[in-house]
Image (tube, rainbow, N blue to C red):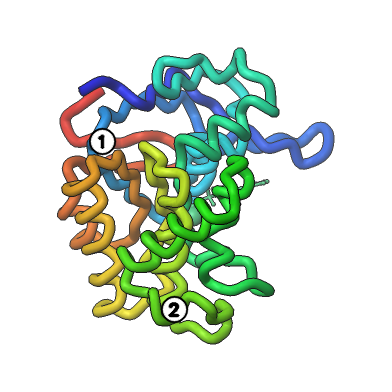
Amino acid sequence: MGEVIRLEHIVKRFYLGQPNELEILHDINFSVQEGEFVSIVGPSGSGKSTLMNLIGVLDRPTEGRYFLDGIDLSRVTDNELSDIRNKKIGFVFQTYNLIAKTNAQKNVELPMLYAGLGRSERRARARELLEMVEMTDRARHLPEELSGGQKQRVAIARAMANDPAIILADEPTGALDTKTGRLVMDLFHRLHREQGKTIILITHSPELAAETDRIIAIRDGQIMDQGGRD
Ligand code: ADP
Ligand code: MG
């Protein structure tokens, strides 16, 4: 098992109009091994989502280097980057981020459409994924017709669409009650155990974090503890 993610001296600043700039992440260093299930914990505003957006290649760091599967992403063009993102990373968000106008099945198909898969292949795979999250009977429902937990299960099916090696989940249970959050967490455990997915989970819940292989604690844009690794 190798290293899938390596961050070296990552700094992130936001420019708020000259001359103001805000440094949100300061010299972040860590790596994640293939098949690891790690959690990132820290107070609100500590930079967790900013870090997740960098790991998910939704944004680029101001300084430092990010190696994904050994590839130095600073040398990759924006076009290649979105391709890498679509193939290698699945995202799950607190607010689900489903497309409101289209049904569960089409939501799951979307990343496959971007990846260039044909219609029948997309349909078959989406059905398989909806079955995995036990949402087959809701395939034709719009997001607004689904409960929070159901929406999150569709979002997890969508995250798995292109069989990514890595799943990034930013407070996936944050809007759910404890029982529903438990079901979502169990799904992540299954994907980790049965499919060997590398999972990075941001959570406010110490209990859920304690279920993962390693806890990375972040505060004020710095890593305070990374569970016995550097
Ligand atoms: P967390 O997810 O841990 O709650 P965030 O990463 O969302 O924290 O935010 C960390 C800090 O960065 C906050 O102070 C937030 O206001 C700031 N921030 C996040 N995104 C931007 C942005 N695009 N522009 C300016 N400031 C931002
Ligand atoms: Mg956040």
Mark 1 closeness class: few <14, some 14–19, many ≥20 residues within 10 Å: some
SS at mark 2 in the image: helix
Q: Which residue is drawn at 62% across and 18% down?
A: 76
Q: Residue at x 46, y 73 (%)?
A: 151
Residue 84 position by quadrant: top right
Tally the marks. 2
Q: Position of residue 128 (x, y in %)?
A: 37, 61
Q: Nearer the viewer, residue 150 or 138?
A: 138
Amino acid bearing label 2: Gly
Q: Position of residue 115 (x, y in %)?
A: 59, 41
Furthest toward the front, the residue is: 120
Q: Does the residue labelled 1 lie within 8 Å of ligand 1?
A: no
Residue 44 visible, this orientation:
no
Which of labels 2 and 1 is toward the front? Answer: 2
Q: Which residue is drawn at 68% across and 21% down?
A: 77
The Cα–Cα distance between marks 2 and 1, rounded to whole angstroms, is: 32 Å
Vertical position of residue 3 compared to residue 221: above or below: above
Q: Position of residue 40 (x, y in %)?
A: 33, 46
Residue 129 position by quadrant: bottom left
Q: Determine which of the numbered discs, if any, sits on residue 225 in the image.
A: 1
Instruction: Tell whether 113 sits left or right of 175.
Output: right
Instruction: Tell whether 31 sits left or right of 1.
Output: right
Q: Determine which of the numbered discs, if any, sits on residue 92 in the image.
A: none
Residue 184 visible, this orientation:
yes
Q: Nearer the viewer, residue 67 or 192?
A: 192
According to the picture, the residue beneath numbered tag 2 turns out to be 148
Furthest toward the right, the residue is: 18
Amino acid bearing label 1: Asp
Instruction: Tell whether 84 sits left or right of 205.
Output: right
